Amino acid sequence: MSGKTICLQNVEHFFSSHRIGEPPTKVLCQTSVTMPKQQFVSLVGPSGCGKTTVLNMAAGLVRPTQGNITLDGKTPKVGDPDVGYLLARDALLPWRTALMNVSLPLELRGGGRKERESLARKILEEVGLGNFADAYPAQLSHGMRQRVAVARTLVAEPNTLLMDEPFSALDAQTRLSVQQLFLRLWERVQSTVLFVTHDLTEAILMSDRVLVFSARPGEIVAEFEVDFERPRSLRELQSSERFHDLFRRIWDVFRQEVEV
Amino acid sequence: MTQLEEGVRMAKHSEIAASPAAIDAPKRRKPLADRLLAVIAGWIVLAGVGGGLWEWAGRSGYVNPLFISYPSAIGHALLKGLYEGLITVDARYTFVAVFLGFAGAAVLGIAVAFALAQNAYLKKVVDPFLTALNSLPRVALAPLFLMWFGIGLFSHVLMAASLTFFVVLANTTAGIESVDQDHLLLARLQGATRWQTFRLFIVPSALPGIFVGLELGFIFGTLGTVSGEMIVGEHGLGVRLSRDAGIFDTADYFATLFALVVISALLTFCFQALKNRLLGWQRLHVVQKSH
């Protein structure tokens, strides 16, 4: 069991303006926060509040204008094999079968064909797509494609996961089943997860901790612990009183930011 | 049942039922367009009616056969050409030139496209010159090539190459530029090296474009060689065409055109077979989209 500790120290970020002479736009106010290892942390907030920017900083894609972000004390580096990244768009390669898409990260890292294919096959079975290993993405439904993407992210066993609204493109029914599936897989390994979403329900159902961001320029305006026991059954949890209480408490804060 | 299994079962129920692969279509009579025999019958009828009308118009003198000839005379000319081996010799000469020009220009076109894609500065510098060269009517180069290299195979090879190169270059570039930005992001996040990004992400994305370029490039290469031969040459189907026209041998003219069409069509067919083998995934895409 492992995972990295993600630490933001006085991080502040600006987007430079495209027009000459205009001042840069502030997207993120000075923020300091620590996400301990193996914690599932959701970042929620209105569009443009800088939550994806925080995620991209953790991935090493963006350097903060001010301050420091570290993973286990080190500056994040793009392409770190310990860090997995999952997007809303599945970004599967259309010319590769599901199996070959899942084994891609292993292929990029080198390693025997037999070994990587057996690992990929195993994880495809775990996401319920064992019979679709040889199907091309065009032959799969949205939900199945996103499950292939989940398998591709998990196959290299990253200890830290960065997820940018990974289930937002799915319809409600499919979303719940993929969320449940992901949670089952995650609960076994408990990597550190940084999860960006604008769906409050999703944030509460999945995570240990919810950070609410304000509208741009973003800052953390509230923080909630979600102490529901694991493993969780999302369907049960969704209809429980505890869930609704917490939802209302967070929504009271969240609503003010969305309505700004 | 463990909770994992439950999750998987739930997922299966909610999604697989909705996937096109799982739907059994009710058995119905196939539409005409999907029935091979019906399509072949249509071809025969169309060719029969068209050819019959032509034959009738030429033979009855309704249209002067000096201008349009008629199918039986053309067939006779074709057989005679084949029997005497003259069409075969000319066809071989023409297509050797097309092939040499095409192959060289295709390799060069693909290489230049990838090289320019790697270097944005070089591309900006070279682009206007390539555009200028490409807008040049290539037939106008034929006399120049003949002046430089004489009446021989090499001039006709260059005519094919001068057209193929730009077609392949343009289509390969379009293919490279069509690479999905999400795929490139994925490559970066997964730590792909430059070479891996090129080999596993960019080249497969560009392949459909490259194939379009090769297919068109071959047609344009044939155009280049034949038009070059029509201007000056010793052998070749183009030479044959201009000679036939000069002596009003319309039947042989059409026979030569027929030979050109058949050979080009056969080679295009080979390309498509190869393309379907390499790019099977693309057709899946199209099938899915048409639903």
Image (spheres, rainbow, N blue to C red):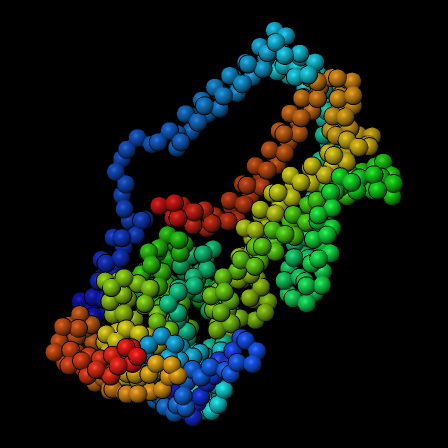
**Rendered location of residue A62, percent (x, y):** 49, 80
Question: Which is nearer the eye, B183 or B163?
Answer: B163
Seen at 78% across and 23% down, the residue is B243
- Work out which quarter of the rendered image holds the C terminus of chain B and state it: top left
Is B202 positioned to the left or the right of A129 in the image? right
**Rendered location of residue A251, percent (x, y):** 22, 80
Q: Is residue B131 visible?
A: yes
Residue B52's quadrant in the figure?
A: top right
Question: Which is nearer the eye, B231 or B233?
Answer: B231
Seen at 73% across and 29% down, the residue is B237
Q: Relative to A184, say whether B55 is above or below.
A: above
Q: Is residue A117 visible?
A: no
Question: Which is nearer the eye, B134 or B38?
Answer: B134
Is B240 positioned to the left or the right of B79 in the image? right
Residue A208's quadrant in the figure?
A: bottom left
Q: Seen from this angle, which residue lies furthest front?
A: A21
**Rendered location of residue B180, percent (x, y):** 49, 61
Seen at 51% across and 46% down, the residue is B277
Q: Seen from this angle, which residue lies furthest top?
A: B60
